[in-house]
Image (cartoon, rainbow, N blue to C red):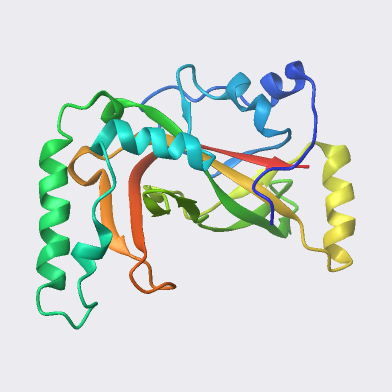
């Protein structure tokens, strides 16, 4: 699935459909289902949100936090069976945690995207339940996978009536409806970045920014 869909919507419609969540409110998983493209995100996300959607933006974010990628080959050594592997990985995380204290990017409000699918329709709520999965982004730092903390376990997208009926018909025919799940929040200072290794590719570095979620938005073409 592509991360974004080439759909265009009027600015007024987006603003009416997605009021900004005040800081400090608990993120709710029930949100309007919007039609929009990546270029419209800044019009309805909280002011000052940094969009971490593409490799370049993510790399600049990591540059600001930790300066340069680690020497993954040295940390990996001979792999998981190397007796010093776990200790080197632990030390990498501990040392970088200490060095990034006080960095401005730790305080940023950021937005990232996960993949989503519409599933069961809830007549009472007038919306569709949403199933989600993380997105993995290849960067010069390694693979980046955002972790969502305090994410609601009951995710539901509420479309406008016209779109709702169209989507219901498609789902009844067995069609898959893919959406983008945009999550906004801030890094958790005490566990802001977790360094590990990919389970899919031996020796490939994996970086997991841990974000406490403040709001969720759903986008569909």
Q: What residue is rendered at 16% in x and 80% in y?
A: 82
Q: How many numbered marks are there?
A: 0
Q: Is residue 28 in sight in this rendering? A: no
Instruction: Using residue 144 as the reference point, say whether residue 91 is left or right of it.
Output: left
Q: Position of residue 128 (x, y in %)?
A: 70, 52
User: Which of the 4 quarters of the picture holds residue 22?
Assistant: top left
Q: Is residue 196 in sight in this rendering? A: yes
Q: What residue is rendered at 78% in x and 42% in y?
A: 221
Q: Is residue 200 above or below residue 2?
A: below
Q: Is residue 114 above or below residue 88?
A: above
Instruction: Using residue 180 as the reference point, say whether residue 83 is left or right of it.
Output: left
Q: Position of residue 97 (x, y in %)?
A: 15, 43
User: Which of the 4 quarters of the picture holds residue 169?
Assistant: bottom right
Q: What residue is rendered at 37% in x and 34% in y?
A: 61
- The residue furthest bottom is 81
Q: Position of residue 199 (x, y in %)?
A: 39, 73
Q: Quadrant of the N terminus?
A: bottom right
Instruction: Using residue 92 as the reference point, say whether residue 148 is left or right of it.
Output: right
User: Which of the 4 quarters of the picture holds residue 89?
Assistant: bottom left
Q: Position of residue 156 (x, y in %)?
A: 62, 49
Q: Nearer the viewer, residue 30 or 214?
A: 214
Instruction: Using residue 118 as the reference point, say whether residue 41 is left or right of it.
Output: left
Q: Is residue 23 above or below residue 183?
A: above
């Amino acid at each position: 699935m592509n991360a974004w869909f080439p759909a265009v919507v009027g600015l007024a419609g987006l603003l009416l459909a997605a009021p900004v969540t005040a800081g400090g409110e608990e993120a709710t998983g029930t949100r309007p289902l919007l039609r929009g493209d990546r270029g419209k995100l800044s019009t309805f996300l909280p002011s000052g949100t940094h969009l971490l959607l593409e490799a370049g933006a993510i790399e600049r974010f990591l540059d600001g936090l930790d300066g340069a990628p680690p020497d993954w080959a040295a940390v990996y050594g001979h792999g998981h069976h190397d007796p010093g592997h776990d200790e080197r990985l632990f030390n990498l995380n501990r040392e970088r945690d200490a060095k990034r204290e006080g960095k401005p990017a730790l305080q940023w409000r950021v937005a990232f995207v996960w993949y989503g699918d519409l599933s069961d329709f809830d007549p009472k709520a007038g919306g569709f339940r949403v199933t989600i999965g993380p997105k993995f982004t290849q960067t010069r730092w390694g693979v980046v996978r955002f972790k969502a903390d305090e994410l609601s376990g009951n995710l539901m997208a509420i479309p406008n009536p016209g779109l709702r009926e169209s989507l219901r018909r498609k789902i009844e025919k067995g069609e898959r409806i893919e959406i983008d799940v945009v999550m906004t929040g801030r890094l958790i200072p005490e566990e802001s970045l977790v360094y590990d290794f990919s389970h899919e590719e031996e020796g490939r570095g994996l970086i997991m920014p841990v974000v406490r979620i403040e709001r969720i938005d759903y986008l569909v073409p």
